[in-house]
Image: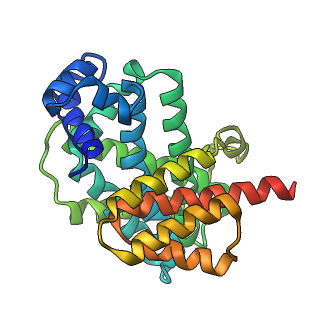
Amino acid sequence: MSKKQLIMDKSLELFAENGFEATSVQQITERCGISKGAFYLYFHSKDELIASLIDHFMGKMIADIEQMVINEKDGSNLLYRFLQVSLGEFQKHSNVAKLFFKEFLFSFNQDLLKRLEQYMAALNKLMLEIIKKQFPDTPARMHLDLLFTLNGLIKSYSELFIIDHYPLDFELLCRSIIEKVTIIAENAKIGAINPIYLTLKDVPLQITKDEVLKKLEEGMEEAGEDPIIMESLALLKENLVSSRLNDAIVQGLLNNIRTIAPFKWTAYIYELYIRENEKKNGE
């Protein structure tokens, strides 16, 4: 385990025990058995550490969901698979989820809240695509109401097992949520949410070239002896600086890393950065 991963793991333990605000950098370094200097080699502040934790958990989930939306041929199965991924992540990392449910509004500064808002906007866009594919016969004016319904059900049921520790059958829960959303999709006629809401809440995830380069360099340190991963990361880094590779080669290199857990987020933000850069250049 890398020292950076050690800091992230041990800080999560402390955050779960004491909360974000009550946990100090001193406590984190003592739990890790490292000096403060070693901590600041990886994170400039506690807030930067929390931002990295947000990136780690939200980023992986969003990257998984985006690939699922892109690759799923059967639209009628999308919502079930989405619920499996999202609820599975909440269950797997219930201590982290509990912190975000109970504390983040009171403990986070504006930059962290904005980062979370960007992730939620990205997640909502993906969920809207899932709803459109899952319910192709539902009028477009109802799509946003279905999104709010789905978000509300996920949040309410998640609190049952995250906050109240109520034992839930996840297979049954997924089918139950789908049943309720389907009833509304097939029968509801009155849409309360105006489409302009999407433009008001469109907060794109801001990714800088330096962030992408940093993730590529960290990945090269973690790649170990795997020559394909190491070379793919090195070529992607070189291309980010010089833009010498064509799109087909870049996609091939991204495909080499996007299916491997530690590098899913790296592939996602690389592609996002390229996409946003091309959009700016085309304006």
**Would you say residue 134 is visible in this rendering?**
no
Name the one closer to the observer, 114 or 181.
114
Compared to 52, does 214 lie above or below? below
Compared to 187, does 107 lie above or below? above
Taking the view exactly as shown, the residue that stands out farthest to the right is: 283
* Residue 276 image point, x, y percent: 70, 55
**Would you say residue 278 is visible in this rendering?**
yes
* 244 horizontally vs 50: left or right: right
* Residue 195 image point, x, y percent: 71, 48
* 15 horizontally vs 74: left or right: left
Residue in the picture at 61% in, 57% down: 272
Name the one closer to the observer, 100 or 224.
224
* Residue 94 image point, x, y percent: 22, 44
* 274 horizontally vs 280: left or right: left
Residue in the picture at 14% in, 29% down: 31
* Residue 45 image point, x, y percent: 40, 24
Name the one closer to the observer, 106 or 218.
218
Residue in the picture at 54% in, 52% down: 213
Task: Identify the coloring.
Answer: rainbow
Compared to 235, does 2 lie above or below? above
* 111 horizontally vs 29: left or right: right
Compared to 241, does 136 lie above or below? below
